[in-house]
Image (spheres, rainbow, N blue to C red):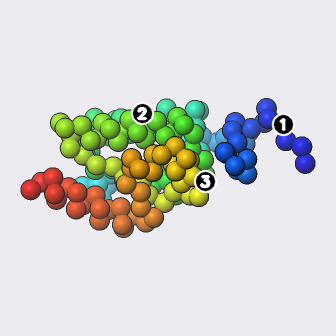
Amino acid sequence: MFFSLSQYASVSVLGQLWYNAEQEDGVEIHEQHQDGILIVKVVGQVDSMTGLELGNRLDSAINQGHKLLAIDLSAVPYISSIGLRVLTVAHRALRAPERRGAMCLVGLSRTVACAFSISGFDQLFSIYDTMPEALAALSSSDEMDSS
C-alpha cells in the first residue's frame, strides 16, 4: 500500500505509528473534582489544532486556584510537541513558589508514553498507570505541603 506524506501529520521515530490528520475530530476535555483534586480527562488527539484548547483549559483551572491536577490521558491516542509543551507550561505554573501545586499524568497509551520517553519528558512528570495511584500521590503531596 502506498502512503502519501501529504495525508499524514507525522511519523514516529520508528516509522511504525502513523497519525492521520484526516481523522481529526477535535478534543474533548472533561473536568471532575475529587477530594480537592481537579481531574482533567482528555479525549482525542492533542496536536497543533487541539493543543491550544487544552492549554486554555489548564491555564483557566490554575488561575482559578486549583493546585492539584490529575491529567487523564488514557483516551489520547496521539500527542504532538505542542501537547507536550502545553502540559509542561501547566506543570511549571503549578510548581511556582507562590502556588506550590502539583500535577501528574495518568494512563498514557503506548504511543503517548513513547513520545514522553523519546523527548525525556517522562523524567519531568509524575506518571501513573491508574487514577487511584495518581490521586493517592497527589493527596500525599498536598499533606506534605500543608504541614
Residue at x-position 49% and y-position 40%: 84
Q: Is residue 104 left or right of residue 77?
A: left
The alpha-carbon separation of the residues under discs 3 and 1 comes to 21 Å
Name the front one of labels 2 and 3.
3
Camera-side residue of 53 and 101: 101
Residue 54 is labelled as: none
Residue 112 in view, yes or no = no
Vertical relation: 111 (above or below) 132 = above
Residue at x-position 15% and y-position 52%: 145
Residue at x-position 49% and y-position 32%: 52
Question: Are the two marked residues, 2 and 3, in contact with CB atoms closer than 8 angstroms?
Answer: no
In the picture, which quadrant includes the C terminus? bottom left
Vertical relation: 88 (above or below) 137 = above
Vertical relation: 127 (above or below) 92 = below
Residue 4 is labelled as: 1
Residue at label 3? 111
The alpha-carbon separation of the residues under discs 1 and 2 comes to 33 Å
User: Picture coordinates of residue 70 (x, y %)?
Assistant: 37, 53
User: Picture coordinates of residue 1 (x, y %)?
Assistant: 90, 48
Label 1, residues with CA under 10 Å away: few <14, some 14-19, many ≥20: few
Vertical relation: 120 (above or below) 5 = below
Q: Secondary structure at mark 3?
A: helix
Residue 56 is labelled as: 2
Q: Secondary structure at mark 1?
A: loop
Q: Amino acid at mark 3?
A: Thr
Q: Amino acid at mark 1?
A: Ser
